[in-house]
Amino acid sequence: MITNKLCVRFGILSVGMLLLAGCAGVGTEQEITVSRINIVDETGEVRFVIAGNSPGPIVRGERLERSIAPAGIIWHDEDGNESGGIVTTPFPPNNTTKARMITFDFTHQITDAVNLGTFESNDGETWKGGLTVYDRRPYVPGPVTSSQGVKRIFLGTQNADAGLIIHDNEGRERIRLGVNPDGEAAIEILDEQGNVIQRIPDNSD
């Protein structure tokens, strides 16, 4: 434990010295190469992880497996639970999508809360960028099996469509407001089955 803390403190000190050197305009090139840095608080609790391949999330004291392999910064709340991060990662199952994301999580019941990111297929044919807001899962004691919340809002662009989509508490699209690639603007109201029941303007004629 003492060795780990010394390594962490040395790593933080080294990063600080590099930043100070850069600010002072030192002409020599310097770099530090590491695979992971843990930043802890005064109690020894890990609060930030900077890693090329982030470890599995800690939830209620238990380390879980990740469905993705993110590189970046992961932050933890005061209880040690993962609570968000800034990462770049391929997406499973076939890793055909590249994602760059900033996320914030609920931690009372671990749930994705807010995601700001870009997503592009490896072939460049499909893409999406925007802000997604989720509802928190109801609290359930015991092991956590998923952090996926119910999507309630998406604001962004997708394959040249720009819009705002609002979902109900079951995650179903109920309101769409947007502009398509041809420059046509519309507002659509949908029922629970996903059928458009009202559209402005009405182009049915």
Image (tube, rainbow, N blue to C red):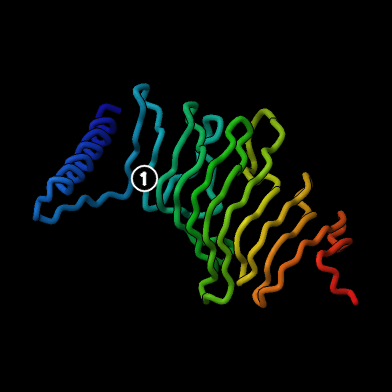
Q: State the image coordinates of residue 20 (x, y, percent, origin top left).
A: 17, 42
The amino acid type, in three-letter code, at marker 1 is: Ile
- Determine which quarter of the picture holds residue 105: top right
Task: Please report the residue visible at 51 percent of the width from the left and 72 percent of the height from the top.
Answer: 122
Circle 1 sits on which residue?
Answer: 50
Q: State the image coordinates of residue 185 (x, y, percent, origin top left).
A: 71, 68
Q: Residues within 10 Å of mark 1 (few under 14, many from 20)?
A: many
Q: Quadrant of the N terminus?
A: top left
Instruction: Tally the numbered discs.
Output: 1
Residue sitting farthest toward the left? 27
- Residue 123 located left or right of residue 151: left
Q: State the image coordinates of residue 149 (x, y, percent, origin top left).
A: 67, 44
Q: Is residue 63 above or below residue 201?
A: above
- Residue 192 located left or right of residue 136: right
- Determine which quarter of the picture holds residue 107: top right
Of residue 60 and residue 42, the one placed in the foreground of this image is 42
Identify the element where label 1 is drawn.
strand
- Residue 88 located left or right of residue 182: left
Residue sitting farthest toward the top? 43
Q: Is residue 29 above or below residue 58?
A: below
Q: Quadrant of the C terminus?
A: bottom right
Q: State the image coordinates of residue 22 (x, y, percent, origin top left).
A: 17, 49
Task: Please report the residue visible at 52 percent of the width from the left and 46 percent of the height from the top.
Answer: 103
Task: Please report the residue visible at 23 percent of the width from the left and 43 percent of the height from the top.
Answer: 15
Task: Please report the residue visible at 44 percent of the width from the left and 43 percent of the height from the top.
Answer: 74
